[in-house]
Amino acid sequence: MKQSRPADGAGPVRAGEEVDAASIARYLGELDSALAVQPILRQFDGGASNLTYLLEYPDRDLVLRRPPFGRLARSAHDVVREARMLEALAPAFPRVPRVVAICEDTSVIGAEFFVMEKIGGLILRRDLPESPTIDPATAHSLCIAFVDTLTSLHAVDTSEPALAAFGRGDGYVSRQLEGWTERYRRAKTPGVGDFEDVIRWLEAHRPASDSGRCLVHNDFRFDNVVLDPDSPARIVGVLDWEMATVGDPLMDLGNSLAYWIEASDEPAFRGLRRQPTNAPGMMTRSELARAYSLLSGRSIENLAFYEVFGLFRLAAIAQQIYRRYVEGNAANTQFANFGAIVRVLEERCRALTGRD
């Protein structure tokens, strides 16, 4: 029998995002007879990109990832690529889920998907859990573990052919800036800003050297790491590798800082908080960046560029999701607020770029 587990954020499948459990059972049963039984399906409410489902079996839990429904941004939501990344990364960075199956046959559930083992543990959401208790000392230790895990990922040898295939290395910052600029402009809807002044600032402040060749997660934040519930300062897993690639590691740090909202931030920005980085004992953004610099040995002299880019990229992601919602291709009603999120992020970018 399965052991009891902490609350995992999975609930009923949202209307309009159903998948065929019987078809899943037939497909997985051909690979492993133990999976021929039809699983109970639940859907994770965290995350806003690929759709993630819990497959409950009598003696184990698996997780299924598939793209969202409706029109998708070009090159986004490639779940097969994500699964191949997990397979390639596992020998060098074992805190990734084990892939059970990769399905490129869209006739099974209407889209490509993959299935992986569920890493049991605690995932932090907006606020700290009541149990286990995370006191200020534990929160600080968790921040150190967070930075240590990120630097460990950036130390992975990307010259290995299986990993080198996931990125083009040199020119990464330029490609990211150009790519997210194009995505934002293409996804723009009435009522949101155009970010053109922010884009011009980023183009003027991009780093002179653009030769990063580290493995970057591209969405490294608390609700994508799994903690040991008996020792919550210990990270046992890292999830959501959809955007992982090879590039400049400071882009990863900047993306993490975009989510790192402090208790002293302005009210509108605090309203976007999705992780408990405001809790007593948590590092500030400056402390987190300095800890990363110390552990990795990398300079953070041009940190402002990376922090502003992280916020702009987050705005572009939110805008893509908001457009899907406006067009009726996303069932999660929380996405109705994403237009307002984009506007707050634009003001935050302007506040940071106005320091020059």
Image: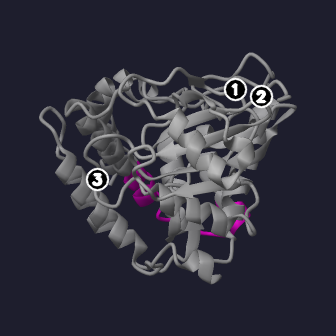
Relative placement, left or right, of 70 versus 133 is left
Q: Which residues are magenta?
A: 293-310
- Sequence-wise, the earlier of marks 2 and 1 is 2
Numbered circle sitting on residue 73: 3
* Neighbourhood count class around disc 1 (C-alpha, 10 Å): few under 14, some 14–19, many 20 upward: some
Please name which of the two marks, 1 or 3, marks the residue nearer to the observer: 3
Quarter of the image containing the C terminus?
bottom left
Numbered circle sitting on residue 136: 2
- The answer to whether any part of residue 350 appears in the image is yes
Residue 295 lies in the magenta-colored region: yes
Relative placement, left or right, of 88 versus 5 is left
Which SS class for mark 3?
A: loop
Please name which of the two marks, 3 or 2, marks the residue nearer to the observer: 3
- Sequence-wise, the earlier of marks 3 and 2 is 3
Residue 344 lies, in percent from the top left, at 31, 33
Residue type indicated by callout 1: Pro
Residue 59 lies, in percent from the top left, at 80, 33
